[in-house]
Image (cartoon, rainbow, N blue to C red):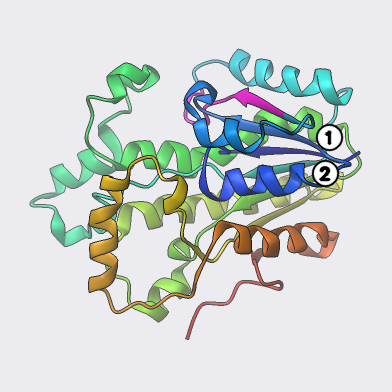
Amino acid sequence: MPSYAVVGASRGIGLEFVYQLACRSDTVVFAIARNPEGSTHLKTAVATFKNVHIISGDVADHSTLEASLRLSKQVSEITSGKLDYLIHNAANLDPNDVFKGFSDYPNMEDLDNDFISAVCGPASRHANQLKLISRPFPLQYKVNSLGPVHSITAFLPLLRASTTRKIIVIGSGGGYAKTILALGIVNICAYAMSKAAAHIAATKFALQLKDEGFVVVTLDPGFVNVSATAPSKDALKGFRAAMRETEVQFAVQTPKESVLDQLRVIDGLESSHNGLYLSHKGGEYQAPG
């Protein structure tokens, strides 16, 4: 009975991963969400499934090793100490600030504060204090760039106990240099840089774990409309308006369509795929154009 942990499962692509995997009767699925009690979409979607276990886990919180060990222990108790697949989907994007480019900052101090300084101190460890901080990038960096490192490290002992040893980091063409060049995307700087770092993190783990028989890949989901489970409809208005003003055209998929494609890729992963950036349609990701 294959076991899967989906990190970032409360909505959108992660939620669809949990649902489709749960529909496979021979699976055990762990849905990792930052705030399970508040994840109404997740609780509703899996209410009738006995093979889904919702677990609290915040990829941005690395304050102690104990947090990661507690997370792993909950999975270990159900699967006799092993995990076959880790799908890291957790991501952060502020729809109100996503289209900022370097020239949108009045000075480098403001840019640095946005990109680095705002939540790097002790306040970042407290959710109630995070709400007071409006600058978007540091949280994006913690979730998008360091999140894969935190989740892979937390689950690595359980993955090592399995013979399957598959790690999938959900990537983004927006963080891929050739896509940025092909589409002429001058802005979306903070998000793009944070996702590019996630791609690098996956590649580093692919090299680190290669001799242990792991397959670690970055998987592009395509352009997916996740508005049905978005945390705030109002927050998406600015994002949609900005998208209409760009010249970039995307073939938009539903989460169901994207995850169906992605699972076909995941089911077919082999050792030769280790370290690659794969398309949800199969094969290596190719920049548009």
Q: Is residue 122 visible?
A: no
Residue for point 85% across, 29% down:
82
Is residue 61 covered in magenta?
A: yes
> In the visual, does 18 lie left or right of 14?
right
> In the visual, does 54 lie left or right of 100?
right
> In the visual, does 238 lie left or right of 7?
left
Question: Mark number for residue 149?
Answer: none
Question: Is disc 1 placed on a helix, strand or loop?
Answer: helix
Which picture quadrant has residue 129?
Answer: top left
Image location of residue 140, percent across then percent down: 38, 42
Q: Is residue 258 visible?
A: yes
> Which amino acid type corresponds to the residue marked 1 in the rendered image?
Arg
Query: Label 2: which residue?
Result: 165
2 or 1: tag closer to the N-terminus: 1
Residue for point 66% across, 31% down:
47
Image location of residue 220, percent across then percent down: 58, 62
> Which amino acid type corresponds to the residue marked 2 in the rendered image?
Arg
Residue in front for this viewpoint, 142 or 203: 142
Residue, far front:
48
Question: Is disc 2 placed on a helix, strand or loop?
Answer: loop
Q: Quadrant of the N terminus?
A: top right
- The answer to whether mark 2 and mark 1 are in CB contact below 8 A is yes
Name the magenta segment's main secondary structure: loop
Query: How far is disc 2 from disc 1 in space, using C-alphas?
Result: 7 Å
Residue, far left:
106
User: Label 2 crowding class (10 Å Cα cut-off): few <14, some 14-19, many 20+?
Assistant: many
Q: Is residue 195 above or below residue 280?
A: above
Residue for point 23% across, 63% down:
241
Question: Mark number for residue 160?
Answer: 1
**Residues shaded magenta:** 53-62
Residue for point 61% across, 72% down:
285
